Image (cartoon, helix red, strand yellow):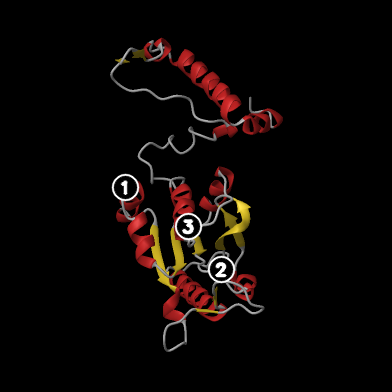
Amino acid sequence: MEFHVMTLFPEMIVQGLSTSVLGRAIARGIISLNAVNIRDYTLDKHKRVDDYPYGGGAGMVMSADPVVRCCRSVFEKIEEKKRGEGKEAGRRRVIYLTPQGRTFSQEMAREFAKEEELVFLCGHYEGIDERAVEMVVTDQVSIGDYVLTGGELAVMVVIDAVARLVPGVLNNGDSAEFETFHDHLLEYPQYTRPEVYEGRAVPEVLLSGHHAKIEQWRRQQSIERTRALRPELLERAVKEGLV
């Protein structure tokens, strides 16, 4: 799977995603990361990519032209690569991280993980000229109801959640599926050695070796934890017949 990120700070994206699990997956060729500097596509001699907003107001707005030119270049390179491999280019999916978008979720991560290519757009300042959004963006996504200084951190969150669902990225093939938000439930409590720590013991059932009882205990713990911390998720699971 290939991730393309259009940004004013490509080094931030590369440094943030080139370590740990994702870094190893990139090194092994399971996923690839292409950070593209939007500033390289401005025609302004001073490399400006922003201007004052029409109608007045605080802050600056990213101009449409460098964003559109950058996006077109990314897709041209994707199509050229596909032609070299004797393949047809897939659909063009450009994800813009913005507080106005749909709230990101595990279901959305699974949906994105089915794609061969994903292109992300990082906004800055007071946002991006709406014409660029209309011309190139297919999905507007938010990671929560708060404001960041730029879209890079939000993009890294989404890429991390999506990439770990790509086969081969995680060492344990079951890890991505059987964890938090599986069946809309929070994950059960986890323990490791020692068996007793400062008077707190690991639940006996986990030491029993009885796999059926362990799975039953874990399932019940997931339900109880979800009921206590995220009751809206449990309600959804019940409606869908998952519990």
Type of residue at label 2?
A: Glu
Circle 2 residue: 126
Q: What's the mark number on residue 155? A: 3
Residue furthest to the bottom: 45
In depth, the one of 7 and 125 nearer the eye is 125
Residue under the image location 53 percent in, 31 percent down: 186
Secondary structure at badge 3 equals helix
Q: Is residue 180 left or right of residue 103?
A: left
Q: Earlier in the sequence, mark 2 or mark 3?
A: 2
| Residue linked to disc 1 | 20
Image: 233 above or below 96 = above
- Looking at the rendered structure, the kind of residue marked 1 is Ser
Q: Is residue 146 left or right of residue 74?
A: right
Count of number-bearing discs? 3
Where is residue 195 drawn, in percent x and y? 31, 15
- Between the C-alphas of marks 2 and 3, the distance is 17 Å
- Numbered label attached to residue 43: none
Q: Nearer the viewer, residue 147 or 20?
A: 147
